[in-house]
Image (tube, grey):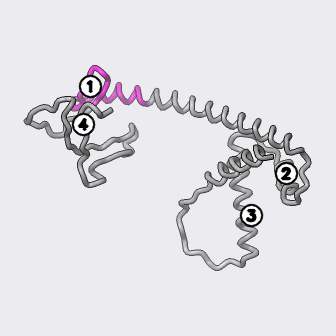
Amino acid sequence: MCNFKRCLLVLIILIFSTINCFADEKKEEPIDKADLEKQISYALGYDIFDKLQENFDLDLDAFTMGARDNFEKQPKLTEEKLKQTLVSYQRIARQKQIERIKIESKENREKGLKFLEDNKLKTDIVTLPSGLQYKVIAAGDGALPKATDTVECHYKGTLIDGTVFDSSYQRGKPATFQVGGVI
């Protein structure tokens, strides 16, 4: 009983964590409470079914029957069978997610390698033996820091499509770190 409730709670949390909490807030017209409850029920049903369908082709009739039976507290399966079935679903969903991640990983690796190959041909790009590439924006004429020194500098990290994922410029303050401690 306790394990089933825990599995069900995890599934519900998973479902609701996928709901877009950051939707644009627009001025809404007043809605009748009963109408709002119907709209919310519909939207949740639509969203939950959509998210669950990403991993498994759901049978709409069986899904609806399960929801209705739960609402009426008249389950057609034993608690143990419900638990086993949800565990099977989680296993299938996890496997599909792993497969998607493997495909995306392979595609991203290929894109990344192509980017590095193309990028190293540019005249203003320096490529180290490790494969690290960088561009000197303004060369300094001071002493070179040792691996044990702490330095302060601005930087901007971007993905290969130009998306900025980290920037000391955006924070308005240079970063301070030990030279040997940087990735």
Q: Gap in Å between the C-alphas at discs 2 and 4?
A: 58 Å
Mark 3 or mark 2, which is nearer the start of the sequence?
Answer: 3
Q: Residues within 10 Å of mark 4 (few under 14, many from 20)?
A: some
Query: Mark 4 near mark 1, Cβ–Cβ under 8 Å?
Result: no
Q: Element at badge 1?
A: strand
Q: Residues within 10 Å of mark 3 (few under 14, many from 20)?
A: few
Mark 4 or mark 2, which is nearer the start of the sequence?
Answer: 2
- Residue occupied by mark 4: 178
- Residue occupied by mark 3: 41
Q: Gap in Å between the C-alphas at discs 2 and 3?
A: 15 Å
Is residue 107 toward the left or the right of residue 122 in the image?
right
- Residue at the farthest front position: 2
Q: Gap in Å between the C-alphas at discs 4 and 1?
A: 22 Å
Q: How many marks?
A: 4
Q: Is residue 132 magenta?
A: yes
- Residue occupied by mark 2: 66
Q: Amino acid at mark 4?
A: Gln
Please report the residue visible at 71 percent of the width from the left and 38 percent of the height from the top.
90
Please state which of the two labelled residues, at mark 1 or mark 3, is closer to the viewer. Answer: 3
- Residue occupied by mark 1: 127
Please report the residue visible at 66 percent of the width from the left and 51 percent of the height from the top.
13
Please state which of the two labelled residues, at mark 4 or mark 1, is closer to the viewer. Answer: 4
In the rendered view, tell whether residue 18 sits above or below residue 35: above
Which residues lie in the magenta part? 112-133
The residue lying toward the viewer, choosing from 139 and 111, is 139
The residue lying toward the viewer, choosing from 1 and 147, is 1
Please report the residue visible at 66 percent of the width from the left and 35 percent of the height from the top.
94
Q: Is residue 98 magenta?
A: no
Is residue 125 toward the left or the right of residue 34 in the image?
left
Q: Gap in Å between the C-alphas at discs 3 and 4?
A: 54 Å
